[in-house]
Image (tube, rainbow, N blue to C red):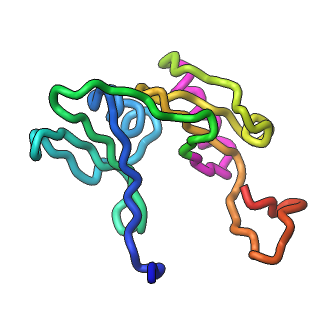
Amino acid sequence: MITENVVVRIARPAKDLTQTKKFYHELLGLPILGEFIDHDGFDGLMIGFENHTHHLEFTVEKDATFNVFSHTEDLIVFYIPDLDQWSQTVQRLKEQKVPCVPSSNPYWDLHGLTFEDPNGYRVVLCKKTWEPSKPSEKNHGANDGH
């Protein structure tokens, strides 16, 4: 049984760790939790916040061809309820000419902006607070479950 003290790592292949690090660390401001070089043929980068139960890992496999297997609804969503912080983050991405793309789900365009990271993955900056829905709720109103 998975319990609340389990750590979740979302691992994704990357085509360029230097650009990935710039995007997530320098532009979004996420701390680097760890990096490795040539560990069994892989280089990697782990980003997130210390003492959180989740983080992202990006890896490059030596001599492998990078292919994005992403779907338009394959998203990393960051909820940024502080509008000044959200605006500053969006401005940094736009200044660096990070591609801003329309979301296939209109919810994300209504509540934020979707960008493509250097690997082609979609990242949503949502300008609201996320609160989980109760299982019995139909996901209507302010607490819509997104």
Residue 57 place in picture, x, y as percent: 33, 48
- 39 with respect to 109 (left or right): left
Which residue does the image show at 32% across and 42% down from the upper left? 58
Q: Which quadrant is home to the C terminus?
A: bottom right
Residue 46 drawn in magenta: no
Q: Main secondary structure of the magenta part?
A: helix
Residue 30 place in picture, x, y as percent: 40, 46
Q: Nearer the viewer, residue 146 or 51?
A: 146
**Quadrant hosting residue 7:** bottom left
Which residue does the image show at 23% across and 42% down from the upper left? 44
**Quadrant hosting residue 12:** top left
Residue 83 drawn in magenta: yes
Q: Residue furthest right?
A: 141
| Residue 31 visible somewhere in the drawing | no
Number of callouts in the render?
0
Residue 4 place in picture, x, y as percent: 47, 79
Q: Compared with residue 52, is residue 108 higher up or lower down, i.e. above or below?
A: above
Residue 99 place in picture, x, y as percent: 56, 20
Q: Which quadrant is home to the N terminus?
A: bottom left
Which residue does the image show at 58% across and 27% down from the upper left? 91
Q: What are the residue bounds of the magenta stretch? A: 77-95
Q: Compared with residue 21, is residue 50 higher up or lower down, i.e. above or below?
A: below
Which residue does the image show at 80% across and 59% down from the upper left? 144
| Residue 43 visible somewhere in the drawing | yes
Q: Nearer the viewer, residue 77 or 127?
A: 77
